[in-house]
């Protein structure tokens, strides 16, 4: 068997740096000597989708990055965006609208990635060999699909659904729904007709992409998540471009459940909490809102402190009465902040209080 070496598909030195800086997380298997790579919430927030980051979406390797013999055990979907994230000044390129496309149901479970652990086929989720979903999916495979032969250098991808694994959409039965098979070297879709179980539902209502977008925007039913659209490349040995179209009502319900708002973002910032707590599990559609809100609030906070520090520096060394009179009369800075800084106090909490925003929430259209 000829394995696909990791260094043949990615810049390993760049990947090592991403792991060091925390933009990519690398977790070991508890016994098989394998590693799984997954981009972090910080990487998703930054939206700088280099090949190394976007491919680290459940990528499984046979060993550490430092070993030149490390090969690709499983290569799931690279990161793909929402329809509004494609085009000028967006993190993803223009969509190849001239190409034919296939629209499938976007399911609301957990991505399950089939891999060989040295003894048998098991399944991981995007970031873990040992999550509850990974363990349940592996057990389900062993019970129902143990006779399925996985081709060499091909990764089989599934949606693991179960009543207990609910996000928004409720599924009545546990199942592994076949999504795609990808070539480990190229990431291209390959045919896999031997799957005996359920396959993801194909939508055949239109061959007009614009009409499909309109359907997603207007659908009033939160019982389905949306569509995944795969543009079929002219050269089938090349990776497909995929894009997500989530139903607007699904996003509205998800926003309510995740409680994302300008105020909750402000609370995280003002209390010094890491944004990871908020970003994990948030739909991609909300990241631009979070990014813009963080930038606005941080900018306002820093501007308040900078203005107060400038006034403090102006009066530093003066008689206290003279300094107080200057601070009281000036209009360029918050007076309480300037007095506090003059007295050597930490005014960060007060500054955050002053920039508390009005309540607003992300839009939930496409």
Image (cartoon, rainbow, N blue to C red):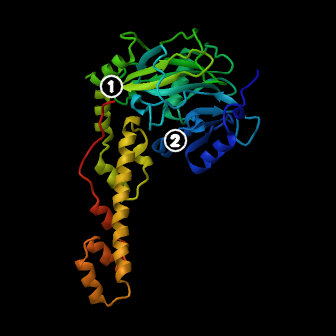
Point 25% across, 72% down: residue:
331
Point 34% across, 83% down: residue:
315
Q: Residues within 10 Å of mark 2 (few under 14, many from 20)?
A: few
Residue 120 falls left or right of residue 281:
right
Q: Which mark is residue 64?
A: none
Residue placed most toward the observer, 56 or 330: 330
* Marks 2/1: CA–CA distance: 25 Å
Q: Secondary structure at mark 1?
A: loop
Q: Is residue 221 visible?
A: no
Identify the residue under disc 1. 247
Identify the residue under disc 2. 48
Q: The N terminus appears in which quarter of the rendering?
A: top right
Q: Secondary structure at mark 2?
A: loop
> Which picture quadrant has residue 185?
top right
* Image position of 320 with respect to 339: above or below: below
Residue 304 falls left or right of residue 116:
left
């Amino acid at each position: 068997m000829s394995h696909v070496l990791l260094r043949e598909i990615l810049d390993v030195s760049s990947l090592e740096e991403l792991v060091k800086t925390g933009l990519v997380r690398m977790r070991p298997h508890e016994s098989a000597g394998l590693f799984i790579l997954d981009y972090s919430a910080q990487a998703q927030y930054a939206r700088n989708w280099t090949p190394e980051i976007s491919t680290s979406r459940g990528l499984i390797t046979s060993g550490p990055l430092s070993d030149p013999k490390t090969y690709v055990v499983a290569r799931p979907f690279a990161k793909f965006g929402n329809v509004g994230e494609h085009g000028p000044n967006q993190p993803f390129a223009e969509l190849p609208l001239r190409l034919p496309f296939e629209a499938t149901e976007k399911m609301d479970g957990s991505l399950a990635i089939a891999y060989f652990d040295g003894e048998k086929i098991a399944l991981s989720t995007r970031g873990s060999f040992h999550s509850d979903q990974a363990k349940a999916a592996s057990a389900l495979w062993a019970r129902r699909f143990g006779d399925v032969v996985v081709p060499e250098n091909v990764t089989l991808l599934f949606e693991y659904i179960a009543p207990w694994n609910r996000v928004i959409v409720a599924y009545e039965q546990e199942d592994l729904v076949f999504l795609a098979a990808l070539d480990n070297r190229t990431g291209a879709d390959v045919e896999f007709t031997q799957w005996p179980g359920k396959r993801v539902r194909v939508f055949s209502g239109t061959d007009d992409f614009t009409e499909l977008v309109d359907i997603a925007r207007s659908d009033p039913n939160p019982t389905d998540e949306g569509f995944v659209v795969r543009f079929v490349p002219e050269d089938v040995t090349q990776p497909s471009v995929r894009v997500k179209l989530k139903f607007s009502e699904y996003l509205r319900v998800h926003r309510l459940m995740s409680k994302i708002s300008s105020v909750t973002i402000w609370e995280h910032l003002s209390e010094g909490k890491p944004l990871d707590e908020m970003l994990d599990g948030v739909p991609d559609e909300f990241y631009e809102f979070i990014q813009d809100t963080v930038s606005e609030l941080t900018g306002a906070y820093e501007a308040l402190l900078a203005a107060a520090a400038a006034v403090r520096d102006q009066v530093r060394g003066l008689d206290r009465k003279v300094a107080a009179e200057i601070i009281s009369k000036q209009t360029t800075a918050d007076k309480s902040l300037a007095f506090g800084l003059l007295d050597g106090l930490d005014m960060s909490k007060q500054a955050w209080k002053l920039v508390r925003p009005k309540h607003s929430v992300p839009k939930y259209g496409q």
